[in-house]
Image (spheres, rainbow, N blue to C red):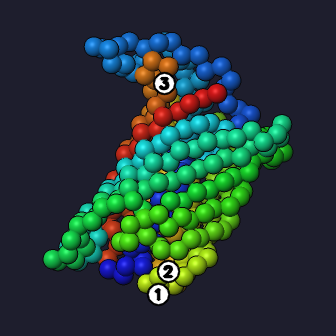
Amino acid sequence: MNSTLTKLSLVFAVSLPTGVLAQSSSAISSGDTVTQGATAGGVPVPNTSGSPAPGEAADLAKQLSNPVASLISVPFQLNYDTGIGEVDADRWVLNVQPVIPFDLSDNWNLISRTIVPFIDLDSPVIGGSDTSGLGDIVQSFFFSPKAPTKGGWIWGAGPVLLLPTGKDEFSSDNWGVGPTFVALKQKNGWTYGALVNHIWGVDSPSDGRDKTNATFLQPFLTYTTPDAWTFSINAEASYDWNEEEWTAPLNIGVSKLVHFGQQPVSFQLAGRPYLDSPSGGPDWGLRFNVTFLFPK
């Protein structure tokens, strides 16, 4: 398996939202009152009736479909991919993805999205060694208007940074920078749009590889029911311009927002067949995601 493609696919496999993340900041409930849930042996259990109101829970669930929602969230996204290399090896990636909004003015927010990947990879070749460790961190900043456009579009734009924090086997070994942009619409429970970024390497890798030159594109479509179930489909397509290769898993998932006492939490399960991948790349995978929400 081409090591450059392996590392780039790891970098861009983690450069996206969880599910994606949902409504414009102007639509966020300012009074998310939640009744304390039951406990069992001192451990909170999910509320299943009465509180919060179904509309409030659905609003929070919708906010997990908008990458520039003005909502603090901490997703823990676990990806399992298989079929890698000549031995059909497995790969596990845990992405910790804190999202923090900042109020810049009466009209603008700044959304910080950080993706920190922890990777465990079985050897993709016979006789090789398994390896695990930290991957490269991807940091995005979106400047986003608080109100949608007259046409109902929600959008955000800003810089994306690639930090070469990863272990040698997982790192691009260069700093990177580029633009990122997201646009979406929400109506009657539906959310559709796309997120795109491009990263150029700004210094040369020490092992003689080409600088990073890659595009990431994520079209997404979700539907949230009045009782806070969300059904989603999105593609996480990355294109390596140096190798002229695509890596494109298709994520098809379902999620549910519940409350543990006053703490809203979303659980997601998704399948991820690969529409395209480099030679020796994954064939299919699964995703499990737990997101802790902190509404204002």
Q: CA distance from mark 1 to mark 3?
A: 48 Å
The kind of residue tagged 3 is Gln
In this rendering, which labeled residue sits more in front, label 3 or label 2? Answer: 2
Dot 1 alpha-carbon crowd within 10 angstroms: few under 14, some 14 to 19, many 20 or more: few
Check disc 2 and report its element: helix, strand or loop: loop
Split into 4 quadrants, where in the image is the N terminus? bottom left
Residue at horizontal 74 percent and vertical 43 percent from the top: 109
Q: Is residue 28 above or below residue 101?
A: above
Pointer 3 residue? 263
Examine the image and state in which quarter residue 140 appears. bottom right
Mark 1 or mark 3, whichever is nearer to me: 1
Q: Secondary structure at mark 3?
A: strand
x then y, percent, for residue 208: 46, 87
Q: Amino acid at mark 2?
A: Pro
State left or right for residue 195 relative to residue 207.
Answer: right
Which residue is drawn at the image coordinates 63% and 68% (left, top)?
177
Name the amino acid, label 1: Gly
Question: Separation of disc 2 and disc 1 at Cα?
Answer: 6 Å
The residue lying at 59 percent from left, 23 percent from top is 56
| Residue 236 percent location from the top left of the image | 50, 61
> Circle 2 is placed at which residue position?
205
The numbered disc on residue 115 is none
Label 1: which secondary element: loop
Where is 198 relative to 255, above or below? below
Identify residue for label 1: 208
Query: Front-most of 206 and 25?
Result: 206
Q: Tell me if residue 253 can be seen.
A: no
